[in-house]
Amino acid sequence: MAEQPRRSFVCGHPIKHSRSPKIHGYWLERYGIGGSYVAVDVAPEEFSTFAAAIKAGDYVGGNVTIPHKEAAFQAVDRRDEAASAIGAVNTLWVEDGLLHGSNTDAYGFAANLDERAPGWANGGGTAAVLGAGGAARAVLFALKQRGFSEVRLFNRTVERAEALAREFGPIVSAHPLDHANDRVSDASLLVNTTSAGMHGQPELDLDLTRLPADALVTDIVYVPLETPLLAAARRAGLKTVDGLGMLLHQAVPGFERWFGRRPEVTAELRDLIVADLEP
Ligand code: ATR
């Protein structure tokens, strides 16, 4: 019997703004793979039924986005180290009849910097992270894995940063966001994981001249591609990396698992998604 075309998905609610179908569709076409990747709108109360359908073989796997990443974490039979540390699952696959879950955001974050700022983690050192939500967890996991010896976590609601610092151990310390200007003079890396600066959101009030002259500034927000923070960093003469590459790279491990081919994050793919970001 001929093998069925492999079906994969991104599920969320709402889902129509997801760029993942464009990314995976580009790779399926580029490598001539006769599979599919579709966007599925799954309401919160339907997630467990959807997870059961994946496990029953309706799909080889797929991506999970807002608001299902924690429900997916609960639903899987097996989690990898990244998913366990981050507490959320964004990539699912079925193996030997079991539902497996990973979180590829930390991988995507690090791979984006590896591509655009090679050597960014050399020697570890001190990093400053703004924000203490789900995205911050992925960034903290990546920084810990890459050997940073100290991470200062700044958040508007300092209690959230304190809770996260306790989880990640002594390398992470928690501070109020408005202390950031006074505590970044030795940071080789500044990462924004807050939604501030996102299209339609207020900006962060930071003095980037307090960072060392060779510091790298990156934002996980990618709409707009150059956030107010990145624009200010560029004006201050600092190196910057935008967040779009994190989105592209986090998709790589899933595609490889479902379709058996490690896809490339090409300039053409980046251009395709950039064109899609225009209002
Ligand atoms: P995500 O999962 O994408 O990280 P989240 O859990 O909603 O999203 O977290 C959003 C982060 O952005 C939080 O750190 C939030 O700060 P609070 O914990 O104090 O709410 C931060 N954030 C959102 N808007 C902000 C703003 N205008 N200024 C500063 N921080 C902001």
Image (cartoon, rainbow, N blue to C red):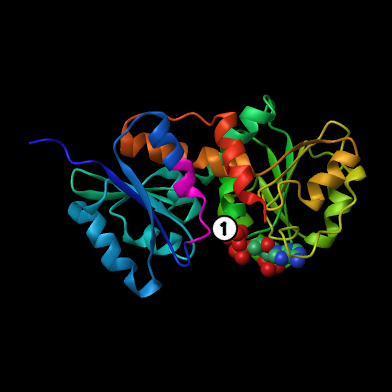
Label 1 beta carbon less than 8 Å to ligand 1 = yes
Residue 188 image point, x, y percent: 78, 36
| Total tally of numbered discs in the picture | 1
Viewer can see residue 110:
no
Q: Is residue 225 left or right of residue 184?
A: left
Residue 113 image point, x, y percent: 65, 33
Viewer can see residue 2:
yes
Q: Is residue 14 left or right of residue 192?
A: left
Identify the residue at horizontal 81%, vertical 52% (top origin): 228
Identify the residue at horizontal 53%, vertical 31% (top origin): 265
* Outermost bottom residue: 45
Q: Which secondary structure lies at badge 1? A: helix
Q: Is residue 19 left or right of residue 36?
A: right
Q: Where are the magenta residues, as a range? A: 16-24
> Is residue 69 shown in magenta?
no
In the rendered view, tell whether residue 179 sits above or below residue 226. below
Of residues 19 and 127, the one drawn nearer to the viewer in this rendering: 19
Near mark 1 (Cα within 10 A), the count class, few <14, some 14-19 or many ≥20, is some
Identify the residue at horizontal 29%, vertical 63% (top origin): 50
Per the image, the residue denoted by label 1 is 134
Residue 34 image point, x, y percent: 29, 36
Of residues 80 and 50, the one drawn nearer to the viewer in this rendering: 50
Which quadrant does the C terminus fall into?
A: bottom right
In the rendered view, tell whether residue 54 sits above or below residue 32. below
Residue 181 image point, x, y percent: 88, 52
Q: Name the quarter showing ligand 1.
A: bottom right
Amino acid type, callout 1: Gly
